[in-house]
Amino acid sequence: MVPQAACFVVPRVSSWAEFRRARAGGRLDWTTLQTRDRVAVFIPSDVAPQEIRDCLHEEVSQALGPLNDLYRLPDSVFNDDNFNAVLTGFDMLILRAYYDDALQSGMTRAQVADRLPAILSRLNPRGDGRGARPVSATPRSWIDAIETALGPGSSDRARIEAAERAVTIARNANWSDGRLAFSYFALGRLTLSSSVETSVASFQRAAGIYDRIAPGDIQAAHVDMQLAAFALSSGRADEALRLTGAALPAATAAQNAALLSTLLMIRAEALEQVGRASEARSVRLDSLAWGRYGFGSGAAVGARLTEVAALSPGG
């Protein structure tokens, strides 16, 4: 079977034909590799430029480095929450450590653990002396709930129930980190059309957590975009302007053109509401340029523009 992800990386093949021939056996099993000498990244040809770039960042980095995604990582593409789409400073540090001359294929876990402190100290001396922040492991039950909530193949009701289950698991585990915030974020997204009150409350809870643990970062920007859309639709233009203004720097730093475009579209509508028509036209024009990279076709950009315009009262 072909993985359900938009893009994926597999070992020991160099072409689509070779992948199709090999997928029935165990040849593509990463756990059987002793060394990596050949991998292939497969990306759809009909997606936006941003998605191609994002896929290349994540899949090539996983081909070269760590294979597993960990939801507890707050600042990494190696996290399936998909907030970070391009390699972060943390990711580059991990890749540099992975290929440090002090490590070789075939070393045991204990041997690697013994050498890592010196490697990290040399590569990132600013981290010396900082205490570790232990984070509990993520149970399979929470991962399954999130994958059901945000993945394909389930009904809307089943996906909402899965998101609610993720929130319950996170709260029962006494998490106060990004996993609890992401649980609320998922619930907020899934209840957008069925329960505005639940959706807004969920996004607000996610915002409170992200503002505490990662103020001004890309996670908060995604939540602020959702809350700005609600503010716009309820006629609170000043609040929409505040939220989009807070989110734009993080979206720019993260090179997320789709998010940037949407924020600017919302901002343009809010500017129209407060009578700043000339500024609104300029901001809307900027949104279109980012949108072509983030969404791909002109039709896709136009559809998003229409969707955002419809949020304004009387739109």
Image (cartoon, grey):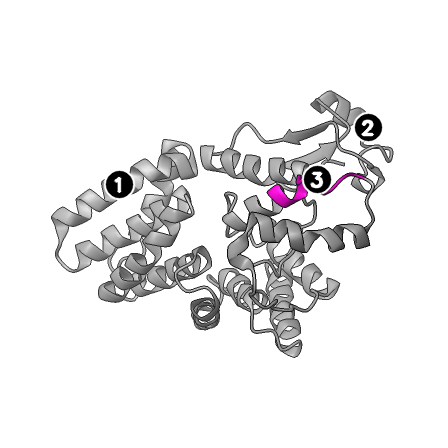
Q: Percent position (x, y) of residue 272? A: 18, 54
SS for tag 1? Answer: helix
- 149 is higher (above) or lower (below) than 101: below
Magenta stretch mostly in which secondary structure?
Answer: loop
Q: Percent position (x, y) of residue 24? A: 84, 32
Q: Which residue is mark 1?
A: 286
Residue 260 appears in the figure: yes
Question: Is 233 situated left or right of 152 in this image?
Answer: left
Q: Is residue 103 magenta?
A: yes
Q: Quadrant of residue 294?
A: top left
Q: Is residue 262 magenta?
A: no
Q: Percent position (x, y) of residue 158? A: 65, 62
Marks 1 and 2, how far apart in space?
46 Å
Question: Is 301 situated left or right of 47 in this image?
Answer: left
SS for tag 3? Answer: loop
Mark 3 Cα-neighbour bin, 10 Å: few <14, some 14–19, many ≥20: few
**Mark seen at residue 22:** 2
Residue type, numbered disc 2: Ala
- 64 is higher (above) or lower (below) than 22: below
Screen quadrant of the C terminus: bottom left
Marks 3 and 1, how far apart in space?
36 Å
**Magenta highlight range:** 96-105
Marks 3 and 2, how far apart in space?
14 Å
Residue type, numbered disc 1: Asp
CB-based contact (under 8 Å), mark 3 and mark 1: no
- 188 is higher (above) or lower (below) than 262: below
Screen quadrant of the N terminus: top right
Residue 79 appears in the figure: no
The answer to which of 92 and 152 lies nearer the viewer is 92
Mark 1 Cα-neighbour bin, 10 Å: few <14, some 14–19, many ≥20: some
The answer to which of 188 and 62 lies nearer the viewer is 62
Mark 2 Cα-neighbour bin, 10 Å: few <14, some 14–19, many ≥20: some
